[in-house]
Image (spheres, grey):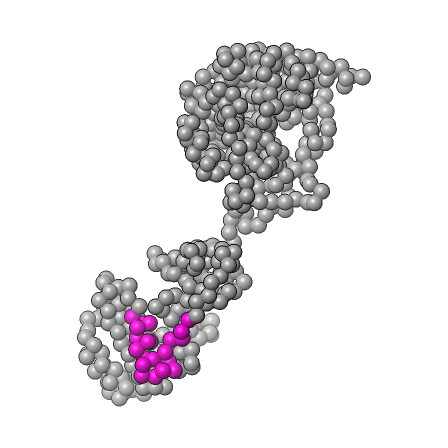
Amino acid sequence: MAVCISLSRNIAKWDEALEKRKILSQASFEQMWRPVRLNDGSAAPYGFGWQIGKTDSGHRLVEHGGAWQGFAAYIGRYLDDRLCVAVLCNRAGARAGYIAKRVAGFYVPTVAPRTHTVVHLNPGVLSSYAGDYRLEDRFTIKVSVAGDRLEATWLGEKISLIPESDTTFFEEDSDRRFRFVKGRLANRITATKVARMENFICVQCGTQFAETSAAPSRCPICEDERQFVRHTGQEWTTLERLQADHHNRIEDEARQLLGFGTEPEFAIGQRALLLQSPGGNLLWDCISLLDDETIAEVNARGGIRAIAISHPHFYSSMIEWAECFDAQIFLHSADREWVMRPAAAGSRIQFWEEPILSLWDGLTLINCGGHFEGGTVLHWPTGANGKGALLTSDIITVVQDRRYVSFMRSYPNIIPLGASAIRRIVERIEPFSFERIYGGWWEANVLSDAKAAVTRSAKRYLRWISR
């Protein structure tokens, strides 16, 4: 970068010398204002130190501007009009070029910058332009909505873009105009819009997927025989859209057991449970929607130390929750293949393999299998006033007759489990005492004599499948 300290009268003398060809030959003048030829044979609108172009009205204009610490300067020569305007400002952010062009318009009205008519756009139109635009693979322009206009940020500069049509915007006190063309931002150079990366959520099962620019073509969890793809086909949403038209019902299911479920009903309609314990809170199972109200309520209860999930139908937005509350996730390794949104490097997910995993305050994860090979239940020894409770989701599902529970490989497709799977579930929970069972949906609970209910339910199930 070169810096020259000058006065306006010196620039006037210099321009007069240029005009009268006192300092350069005619050939040099022609070369100075001739567009450069690039190596690929194309022409670029730049000569020797001059930007070469035309005004909106077609007048030839060569110009140059710049800024230095606390100063801004511009010079423009209108070749067809024998007019030169130079502006020196003692303010780095001053629009010296725009000032000069407005001054030029007083002498030659046809070269004045065009006037703008402000229009008011539908918020949806403005939102459609928000995103990142990559400029010739060099840097990114970020465009966001700011009230009734757009705001563009690049190289540390913020520019307010005011709409003058559905596709064209202008910068206040500037002759710069910006036009959006099918996903691109067009100025003097073209910036290609970077596709917005989103974590899409399956509407049927509620599972959040890894970031993609477009919705995934399929949901492996729904295509599995334990779930289903809705008759109208696969559908997707995002957490942002879900937050716009859904909210979470937040209610105590029991002392120190807070339930979260989304309304209107979403995915499989499940609810998650925040188990509040002295050594740290554990979120049992998960739901897709996480919003400000939910975050505030969880923080008021002491946050989340870890998340443990029964099986893949409850994985939902587990990474979103884990990142929000800086929590670890416990999943059984047998269900590793069903994780659709892997955690970032230094994974928050701990895959465990043994039949049981001891946590803190006596909390224990028990791998029962059944519905999924990694199917897990949680034993809460101090639940039910110290008599113990089991949080089961639908690994052991609570049925309408609360004296019983049941077991299935697939609930919507009514695929039963075999005898060996039922026996394994009963054997795995046998060492643990529990008076209550809390299932995977609101009020789907067995509130007394729950261990006996599992035993008699298993016997009934085995009796009928053996006939």
The x and y percentages for residue 350 are 50, 28
Q: Is residue 275 magenta?
A: no
Answer with the quarter of the image where residue 404 lies. top right
Between 39 and 383, which is closer to the camera in this rendering?
383
Q: Is residue 294 left or right of residue 313?
A: left
The x and y percentages for residue 233 are 68, 45
Name the quarter where the C terminus is drawn.
top right
The x and y percentages for residue 6 are 19, 73
Answer with the quarter of the image where residue 66 lies. bottom left
Q: Which residues are magenta?
A: 96-116
Between 142 and 120, which is closer to the camera in this rendering?
120
Q: Is residue 273 above or below residue 52?
A: above
Name the quarter where the N terminus is drawn.
bottom left
Q: Is residue 60 above or below residue 2?
A: below
> Of helix, strand and loop, which mostly describes the magenta segment?
helix
- The residue drawn where x is 59% and y is 13% is 448
- The residue drawn where x is 38% and y is 82% is 110
Q: How many marks?
A: 0
Q: Is residue 462 left or right of residue 440?
A: right
Between 285 and 375, which is closer to the camera in this rendering?
285
Res. 447 in view: yes
- The residue drawn where x is 36% and y is 86% is 80
Res. 331 in view: no
Q: Is residue 359 left or right of residue 208?
A: left
